[in-house]
Image: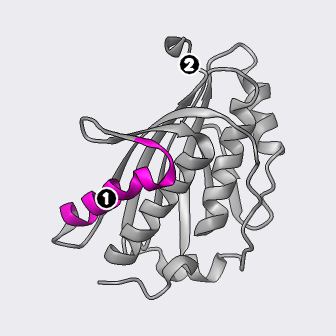
Amino acid sequence: MGNAYGSRQPVGCQFNLSVMSDDFVDVILSALEKTETAEVMMETDDVSSWVHGPISDVFAVVELIYLNAAQTGRHVAMSGTFSAGCPGAQEEDDSKTPAGSTAPRRDVAQQARCKFALYPLGTGDYMEIIQSRINTAADEGVKVSAGHGATRLDGDVRDIFNALESAFLKVQEAAGHTAMTFTLSSNSPSNR
C-alpha cells in the first residue's frame, strides 16, 4: 500500500503551543509572526494552529515556531499531530497545496525532550513498520528511549525534528495514511 506521492504528498500538522509564563500571549504571537510561512497554508484560532503543505516545509515551519518560542528561555511545550494520506481529504489536499521550497531552518542550539507515537493506518504489519523507524531514530543524533505508548527523544530541537520527519516520511511511504502525535518540552524547571 505504498505512497505514489513520496515526499511531495501534502502533510498537515495541528498543534498547540504552551508557554508557562505570564507573557505567554506575547511569546506565542511573536513566535508565529517571526516564522516564514509563505510556502505553507496556515490557520490559527483560539484553540490551535494548523499548517498544511509539502512535508519538508510543514516540518520546518513547526520547528521554527517552536524554536522562536523556546529561544525566549521560557518553559515552552508543543503538542500536536502530523497527518498525511487521509482518504477523505486527498482531493482537497492536492488542489490546495502550494508548490513549496523548503523553508529555512534556524541554526541555533536548543535542547528539548520529546515523546512521539506513530500510527500507520490501513496496514496489517504496523508494528514492524513502527519498530523499524524507532530503531533508526538514534541515527539522527538523538537519545532514544521507550515509554508507555510513546517513544522518547532527547537532544537538540533540530535533531529531534529531523528524526520526527524521517520517521514520519518512511512510515507514510510504507503505509500511505499515517498520523504521528508528538509533545515537545524545553526549558522546564524540572530539568534543573
Residue with the mark numbered 2: 188
Mark 2 residue type: Ser
* Location of residue 77 in the rendering, given as x and y in whole percent from the top left corner: 56, 30
Residue 17: quarter of image: top right
Residue drawn at point x = 67 percent, y = 57 percent? 60
**Residue 32 in the image: above or below residue 188:** below
Q: Residues within 10 Å of mark 2 (few under 14, many from 20)?
A: some
Residue drawn at point x = 34 percent, y = 84 percent? 2
Quarter placement of the N terminus = bottom left
Residue with the mark numbered 1: 119
Point out the stretch of residues depicted in magenta: 127-143
Left or right of residue 108, residue 16 in this image: left
Residue 170 part of the magenta-drawn span: no
Main SS category, magenta section: helix
Residue drawn at point x = 27 percent, y = 35 percent? 147
Residue 188: quarter of image: top right
Query: Which residue is at the front of the view, 61 or 167?
Result: 167
Q: How many marks?
A: 2
